[in-house]
Image: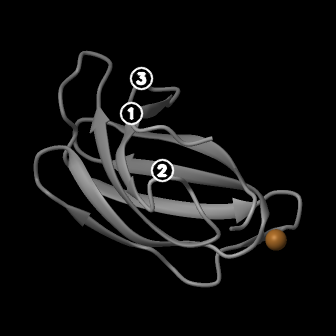
Amino acid sequence: MFTPGLTSNGPAGAAFTILSATPSAVQQGLNDWNVRVRDAGGTPITGTLTITSVMPDHGHGSPTIATVTSNGDGTYGISGINLSMRGVWQVTLTIASPQMNDSASFDFCVDGT
Ligand SMILES: [Cu+2]
């Protein structure tokens, strides 16, 4: 279940937070998120953010690729996260920057609309 502010921490200490989402509840189909990445001390991490979305139970990913835009302040806009089927999705965010490399995952159950 998605709630604004949902955070997942990576093994290197990065905190990936979904600040807001459109639609506000994760839905089957296209989703847009605003994401913040900080290190364990709360410093924003500006770098290259990538996203993957897969259905572990089905062995496939999204049929189209999301677009990530860095706002230059440790926040990122992600558009077109394509959760194309009902079921369990694992969405992984990965940050690459001179400060840190890390990744963390979110698990969602998409129940259709
Ligand atoms: Cu599937």
Q: What is the quadrant of the C terminus in the image?
A: bottom right
Local SS, label 3: loop
Which residue carries the number 2 mark? 93
Residues at marks 3 and 1, CA–CA distance in whole angstroms: 17 Å
Q: Residue at x 40, y 38 (%)?
A: 4
* Callout 1 crowding tier (Cα within 10 Å): few <14, some 14–19, many ≥20: some
Q: Nearer the viewer, mark 2 or mark 1?
A: 1
Q: How many marks?
A: 3
Residue 51 vs 19, above or below: the answer is: below
Ligand 1 resides in the quarter of the picture at bottom right
Which residue carries the number 3 mark? 13
Q: What is the quadrant of the N terminus in the image?
A: top right
Observer-nearest of 17 and 20: 20
* Callout 3 crowding tier (Cα within 10 Å): few <14, some 14–19, many ≥20: some
Looking at the picture, which amino acid does disc 3 mark? Gly
Q: Which mark is residue 5?
A: 1
Q: Check contact, mark 2 vs mark 1: CB within 8 A.
A: no
